Image (spheres, grey):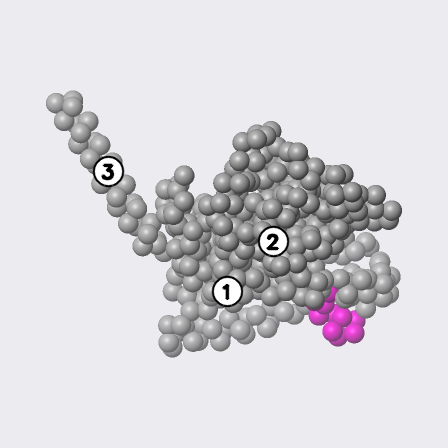
């Protein structure tokens, strides 16, 4: 078997067990104090099999989201409430950044105050345009 | 032109949400091995910052470094760097613009005196006054000295600019030298590689914009964030190396189980500083 074939077949390093314990500790802190945390998966030497195993053991909960700002991102809450998987895809749909967020809601899903202010101005402008057009029609 | 515009204002004007910026800083924090929770603060700081003026000079090079940076064809997370910088001059991309391009370089230098960043790809010809590599009637040597004089920092992108590269090899007919041999009174950051991975190029520029200071450098002037670890340090077979589990042949049981390949390949990964 070639090295490539061995890699394709998949092997695990037992790092998933360590990660799950770290996630459990962070989730306990979130439950008790509300303090959020994140684990950068990209910085860890995980094999493809490790990653799959972690995803399988955390599972999928009842929320999934697709973000389309600056490329595609896939976000879902795992079967453990407060534990979120956030995956940002880059060029060629390769994983550019990937992390586990332990929070009530991932930061990137909440609307930023600057975006809300800009949207408020835009909606008001759009309504003014519609009012002007109505007045012209009348 | 929007000279005093912040990155946040620019994004709003372009209809790009702050989520895109947060996504980029999440990516950046991962690249630079910063704490994951730093991403939000970085996004907030960047939103209040002006875009960084960048002047890109191309000397004795093959354009591979520029290709590395610009080869993406669809809007992606990696492209967000172009919202953080104002690429005021790029010698290769703007070559067709002739005198207008040179005027843009001089205007950017004047408007951003002491604040702009110079990126160089390619080594610098010095023999016979540098006449073996010229552009717009000036030698590369002359343009480098002129442009770097009022720069905040210089980034040498690629092995040619960082260490001389192929043009520097014997018999070196053009007298090629790395940028750091010419520019000795400014910070020079070496992002070596042939070409460097685009993340190392954009990550270094983004670090300057985000933190307004130089990244930590190793003894060869390279950012530690990208050159501080060896391939070995981040290899997914590393846990097996630590356990002393080595494959003896490419097709043996150990190889299939993912054990370390050091003994098979006499791998140089333990001594090769790079981000895999």
Relative depth, front residue between B148 and A22: B148
Relative depth, front residue between B139 and A67: B139
Q: CA distance from mark 3 to mark 2?
A: 45 Å
Q: CA distance from mark 1 to mark 3?
A: 38 Å
Q: Are marks 2 and 1 on the same chain?
A: yes
Q: Mark 2, chain letter?
A: B
Label 3 SS: helix
Q: Which residues are magenta?
A: B232-245
**Farthest-out residue, front:** B129
Q: Nearer the viewer, mark 3 or mark 2?
A: 2
Q: Mark 3, chain letter?
A: A
Q: For the C terminus of chain B, give its image quadrant.
A: bottom right
Q: Quickly name the residue at label 1.
A: B36
Residue B239 lies left or right of residue B199; in this view the side is right
Label 1 SS: loop
Q: Quickly name the residue at label 2.
A: B154
Q: Are marks 1 and 3 on the same chain?
A: no
């Amino acid at each position: 078997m070639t090295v490539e074939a061995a890699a394709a077949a998949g092997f695990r390093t037992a790092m998933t067990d360590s990660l799950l314990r770290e996630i459990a500790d962070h989730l306990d802190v979130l439950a008790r104090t509300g303090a959020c945390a994140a684990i950068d998966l990209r910085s860890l030497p995980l094999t493809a099999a490790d990653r799959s195993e972690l995803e399988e053991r955390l599972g999928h909960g009842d929320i999934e989201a697709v973000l389309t700002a600056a490329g595609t991102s896939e976000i879902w809450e795992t079967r453990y409430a407060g534990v979120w998987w956030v995956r940002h895809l880059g060029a060629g749909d390769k994983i550019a950044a990937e992390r586990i967020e332990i929070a009530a809601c991932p930061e990137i899903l909440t609307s930023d105050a600057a975006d809300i202010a800009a949207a408020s101005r835009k909606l008001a402008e759009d309504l003014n345009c519609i009012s002007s057009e109505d007045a012209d029609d009348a | 032109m929007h000279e005093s515009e912040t990155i946040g204002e620019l994004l709003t004007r372009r209809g790009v949400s702050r989520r895109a910026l947060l996504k980029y800083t999440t990516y950046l924090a991962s690249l630079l091995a910063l704490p994951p929770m730093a991403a939000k603060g970085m996004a907030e700081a960047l939103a209040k910052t002006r875009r960084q003026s960048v002047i890109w000079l191309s000397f004795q090079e093959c354009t591979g470094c520029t290709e590395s940076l610009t080869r993406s064809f669809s809007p992606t997370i990696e492209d967000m760097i172009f919202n953080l910088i104002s690429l005021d001059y790029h010698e290769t991309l703007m070559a067709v613009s002739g005198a207008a391009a040179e005027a843009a370089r001089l205007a950017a230098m004047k408007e951003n005196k002491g604040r702009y960043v110079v990126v160089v790809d390619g080594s610098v010809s010095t023999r016979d006054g540098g006449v073996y590599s010229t552009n717009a009637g000036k030698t590369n040597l002359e343009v480098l000295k002129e442009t770097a004089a009022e720069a905040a920092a210089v980034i040498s992108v690629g092995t040619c600019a960082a260490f001389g590269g192929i043009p520097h090899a014997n018999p070196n007919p053009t007298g090629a030298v790395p940028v750091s041999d010419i520019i000795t009174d400014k910070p020079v950051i070496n992002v070596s590689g042939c070409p460097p991975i685009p993340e190392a190029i954009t990550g270094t520029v983004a670090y300057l914009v985000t933190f307004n200071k130089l990244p930590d450098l190793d003894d060869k002037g390279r950012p530690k964030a990208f050159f501080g670890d060896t391939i070995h340090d981040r290899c997914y077979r590393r846990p097996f190396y630590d356990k002393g589990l080595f494959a003896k042949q490419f097709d043996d049981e150990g190889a299939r189980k993912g054990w370390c390949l050091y003994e098979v390949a006499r791998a140089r990964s333990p001594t090769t500083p790079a981000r895999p």
